[in-house]
Amino acid sequence: MALPDGFLPLTEIPHCLHASLGETARRLDEALERADARASQQQSDPLSETWRALGESRREQLAKVLAVSTFAADTLVHYPDWLTSLDANGELESAPSPRLLDQWLSEALGEASDETTMQSAIRRFRRERMLGIVWRDLTRPNGTSMWETAGAVSRLAEACLEGALGWLEAHFEARWGRPAPRADGSPQRLVVLGMGKLGAGELNLSSDIDLIFAFPEKGVTQGGKREFEHQEYFTKLGQKLIGALDAITADGFAFRVDMRLRPLGDGGPLVGSFAMLASYYQDQGREWERYAMLKARPVAGDIDAGCELLASLSPFVYRKYLDFGAIESLREMKSMINREVKRRGMDDNIKLGRGGIREVEFVVQAFQLIRGGRDTELQVTSLKKALERLPELGLLPQQVIDELTPDYVFLRDLEHAIQALEDRQTQALPHDDAQRERIALAMDMEDWPALMARLSELRGRVRGHFDAVIADPEEEAEGVDEDDSTAYAELRALWRGELSEQEAKALLENAGFADPARGDRRLKALRQSRAVQGMQRIGFERLDALMPLLLEAVIDSESPDTVLERVLPLIESVLRRTAYLALLRENRDALGHLMRLCGASPWIADQIARHPILLDELLTPSTLYTPADKSRLADELRQALGRIPEDDEEAQLEALRVFKHAQVLHVAASDIVGTRALMKVSDYLTFIAEVVLEQVLAMAWKHLTRKHGYPKRRDGSHGETDFIIVGYGKLGGIELGYSSDLDLVFIHDAASQGSTDGERPIDNPVFFTRLGQRIIHLLTAVTPAGALYEVDMRLRPSGNAGLLVTTLEAFADYQRREAWTWEHQALVRARAVAGDTGLEQRFDAVRREVLGQVRDLPALREEVIQMRHKMRDHLGSSAVAKEAGAFDLKQDAGGMVDIEFLCQFAVLAMGHDCPALLVYSDNMRILETLEEHELLPAEDASALREAYLAYRNAFHRSALTKQIVEADFSAQRELVSRLWQRLLEDDDASTPPDISHQETPQ
């Protein structure tokens, strides 16, 4: 005997498998005896000696592998020397690198002179590598995981594809020639796209490989016996490649090849040009093909060209909006699978059955299809990577991932164990008792019942998570109690026009509508509109499924008439973008938030109707009602723009606008529900503007420096920005409202006579003027998402007649020598909001110096009063309006501007003696400083702050409700007017404004 008795330890092997393992040992012994006989003839060492030299641990592993895997046993019987070679090169412990795989296969193929020997070499190579993979999967050395097993099989398939393709190209070159180069001169090769689990790099042990073949450009081959059109050449080459792996020979096959995922499937051409593929997916691509393309990855041939092709197809796969319509397609695919499983009695199939592998994959791929266009982190082929990123993006709780991941790994391990038995592609649980025990052994489970108990628990958990993501909301609505189900059916009949006028009126009246007839007319008008009648089938089905749910949410709101009136324009605006209809249908909570916000604010309803992409924000209430602080805003914007190519300015601009609209919506939503104080609302709106300005400045700077290089600095060097954006008015005063424009001034501090250092140099003044123009363009350019902000540049030195960008020195000189008093008043509310930090500090020093000048107080008082009266006359309420009792909160006497002028007067009059007044640009903190330094009685300061907040709150409310706030401001108006009169107009003009000891008006 070649092997001694007891060579295979049986301590870990179930008793029921001893007999079959003994038979395998007998076959191995015979194989080793034959090998030893050949060695003796060749006067070499007997192979059995290396087997007998195996250590106890290695023999225990061998016993387990042989007991479980008939494939491994048959392979070692045919090639007993492979055990020692695999052991020697370390493959029993770890997978070889891709470089080693390519090297070994290249050496094997180097000896192949025809297709038969080539195919034999590939099959033997694949079988030997698979023996090592199965060994490692069953013995788990060094913590080997399912993911490593799947990755090793994928790398093996890629090596076989590349090796076979390279051999075929060289072998047929003399007859067929080589493809003509591309238009840019680069060579052409076949592009092999791996789909499915090969594309993901996660093949199972006995998987077929799904492929798509492509080539870059049409042309004619060169250098062969005859010319072939590229289409014909690559088709012949593709056919040969399929045969190289898929054909069954005396050595079996290497990999089964499936080409049905290509355009038009078996009825389409085997190979397509890039132009043909792009045209097909754009014009005819179906939803399931988007699902398939999620996994596409170049695996052989021209890898770079494959990446180029996939980049061009990315818009087909990943939509730039949240595409909840994808869930419907996944639902349909899963229903088809379920019907097939039921028809064929395949519930024991761990891939397709309830709670199986496919349901985990559907959960992950649903998020990839829905959100991959926005969250580019999900644009990965690997399911493992996508799973890990879902909690990071807030799409699934970490707890769900902590359950799904190990459950998926268990299912895939079980799949591998089933396939390891005979190297057969199956996911069906066996019925044979011996096979069941072999699988339990492979899975390190006590026995089959224990394995089934674990599997049953796991499948229930997976199905729960699958239902939570993929479940049909309409089925959920119909699955509630009978009364609710009847109400849902009635609302569907109402929408479809199946009720009589009296029935519709009664239904809406009972639902709480104050004017049911008007509500019914609005619904009929929508249903019968040309836009609805002209919808394509899938779009109309989505609308038809949504409307009963929407009406249910309208009825649940506080004011159904108002909400319906405001929400229907939104529905009308998205009739041609039906993914948003799917979004609302799939997210009942989002519908509730929409009703709440539209009911409270027509401004929000209008914003969402104009920018439906804002519907995405309703999906995450944790952020919807919690605006981000400045650091988080900057981080979120950086991440959003980081997903977009740096040279795609149009996409960056669109992302900036969507970001701004979304963040303003967060502020408005928090304002409506009262989660943010008034001052915080303005703070957050100001933060948004500052973050956007920083980014716009960065974009403009890159654009200019890429073309012209960096401007010359004062020290003679080139680089840095030496540029700031100064915010005036509400931006400078940290008091932005929902529709505020931005008062800006641009300042630089580079060398006034220098030029840029690029290939197309321009003078510094020209550079900075173009930089300013670029910033204004980026802020005001209109894209599909609207404009960022309206910009007002009239507060720069000399107004519209002055330079667009001025140097700090010229700005300071103008402020000292030429500026009017009103310009110094405006400077009180000025602060740097973006740009170079050092220049910001130097600007602040100039501002403090100018504001802190000693002034002629009577003249100052007179100019402030004159300017205020002039503004009241031109901008305040007319005499007729005043007669009717009108009060302009901002411009009339006793309004907001009076308080602002009081603060500005105080800063200009007392800043020299009280430098603390020069620190802040906002009115609230200026009033606090006056109080703190006893320059204004506490009662007066407090009263002015309360009046100012009341006015600002009214402005915010008016913006959100699009109505004049009806409130009695007579007390605030009287108080502000009295303070204005006494602090500015009643005093002797020669007396300094010592206002700290005056009595407070009661």
Image (spheres, helix red, strand yellow):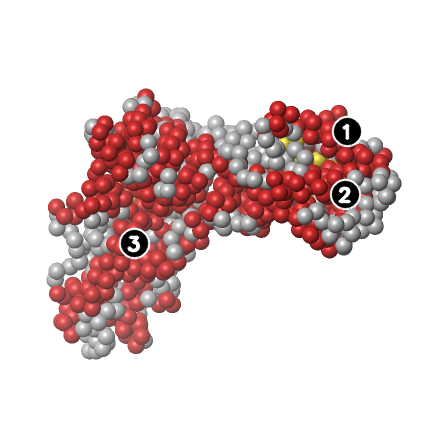
Discs 2/3, front: 2
Q: Nearer the viewer, residue 892 or 723?
A: 892
Disc marking residue 653: none
Residue 680's place in the image compared with 772, above or below, is below
Estimate the spatial distance between the alpha carbons at disc 2 and disc 3, rounded to whole Å: 68 Å
Residue 59 occupies quadrant: bottom left
Estimate the spatial distance between the alpha carbons at disc 2 and disc 1, rounded to whole Å: 31 Å
Q: Nearer the viewer, residue 921 or 43?
A: 921
Q: Residue at x 43, y 32 (%)?
A: 609
Q: Amino acid at mark 3?
A: His
Q: Residue furthest front?
A: 1002
Mark 2 or 3 closer to N-term? 3
In which quadrant will I find the N terminus?
bottom left
Q: Nearer the viewer, residue 543 or 858?
A: 858
The residue that mark 1 highlights is 798
Mark 2 or 1 closer to N-term? 1
Residue 888 occupies quadrant: top right
| Residue 279, image x, y percentages | 37, 27
Residue 979 occupies quadrant: top right
Asked if one can make out residue 433 in the rendered structure from this viewpoint, the answer is yes
SS assignment at label 2: helix
SS assignment at label 1: loop
Q: Amino acid at mark 2?
A: Leu
Discs 2/1, front: 2
| Residue 600, image x, y percentages | 44, 40
Q: Residues within 10 Å of mark 1 (few under 14, many from 20)?
A: some
The residue that mark 2 highlights is 983
Q: Amino acid at mark 1?
A: Ser
The residue that mark 3 highlights is 465
| Residue 358, image x, y percentages | 26, 50
| Residue 711, image x, y percentages | 73, 37
Mark 3 or 1 closer to N-term? 3
